[in-house]
Image (tube, rainbow, N blue to C red):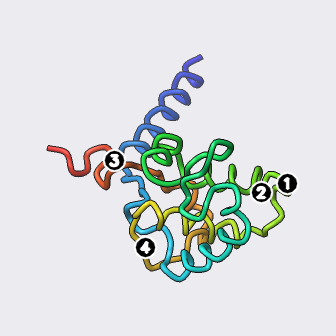
Amino acid sequence: MIRRTILIVLFLVVGAGHSFGQTERTVWDGAYTAEQAMRGGAAYTRSCASCHAPDLRGDSNSPSIVGVSFTFLWGDMTLAALFNKIQSQMPPDGPNTLGSQAYLDILAFILEANQFPPGDEELGATPEALVGTRITTEPYDRVGVGQD
């Protein structure tokens, strides 16, 4: 019983330290490169614009993936969640048919269209970047960052 209690306490302490001791990345930290977004724009035009519109604003059948609509749907989610949704469900007539790099490039284009800044490393260069990067509405939407 004591051993189990110690393990539970240790798990909670390590978990809390991981959650509170590290600053999580956000899309404001530069999660893609400008070149990747440019490739993504071409892929978007070929594979996505017919449903989501050239301006990414969608229509009555497809949601907008830019602006307030985007942050309402995806705010506080990770890039991994959005990537998995796009890859597993788009395009509707052929999910997961574009190849991982094309989906990453399209996601970079969506981030650029939402005015998140580019960085020095391509999106998806490391798996941790997708899982560890959160979509936020403001650069300071992280615990303890930019708040007095």
Of circles 3 and 4, the one toward us is 4
Query: Label 1 vs label 2: CA separation?
Result: 5 Å
Q: Of the two numbered discs 4 and 2 on the same chain, state the one appearing first in sequence.
A: 2
Query: Label 3 vs label 2: CA separation?
Result: 33 Å
> Mark number for residue 142?
3
- Residue that sits furthest to the bottom in the current view: 35
Q: Amino acid at mark 3?
A: Arg
Asked if disc 1 and disc 2 are in contact, CB closer than 8 Å, the reply is yes
Location of the C terminus by quadrant is top left
Q: Is residue 22 above or below residue 14?
A: below
Quadrant hosting residue 13:
top left
Asked if disc 1 and disc 3 are in contact, CB closer than 8 Å, the reply is no
Residue topped by disc 1: 93
Q: Nearer the viewer, residue 55 or 8?
A: 55
| Residue 29, position as x, y percentages in the image | 38, 65
Q: Of the two numbered discs 1 and 3 on the same chain, state the one appearing first in sequence.
A: 1
> Which residue sits at x=68%, y=43%?
61
> Mark number for residue 85?
none
Q: Is residue 115 above or below residue 81?
A: below
Q: Is residue 102 above or below residue 70?
A: below
Query: Label 3 vs label 4: CA separation?
Result: 19 Å
| Residue 83, position as x, y percentages in the image | 64, 56
Of circles 4 and 2, the one toward us is 2
Q: Secondary structure at mark 1?
A: loop
Q: Of the two numbered discs 3 and 2 on the same chain, state the one appearing first in sequence.
A: 2
Residue topped by disc 2: 91
Q: Residues within 10 Å of mark 3 (few under 14, many from 20)?
A: some
Q: Of the two numbered discs 3 and 4 on the same chain, state the one appearing first in sequence.
A: 4
Quadrant hosting residue 100:
bottom right
> Mark number for residue 118?
4
Q: Amino acid at mark 4?
A: Pro
Q: Secondary structure at mark 2?
A: loop
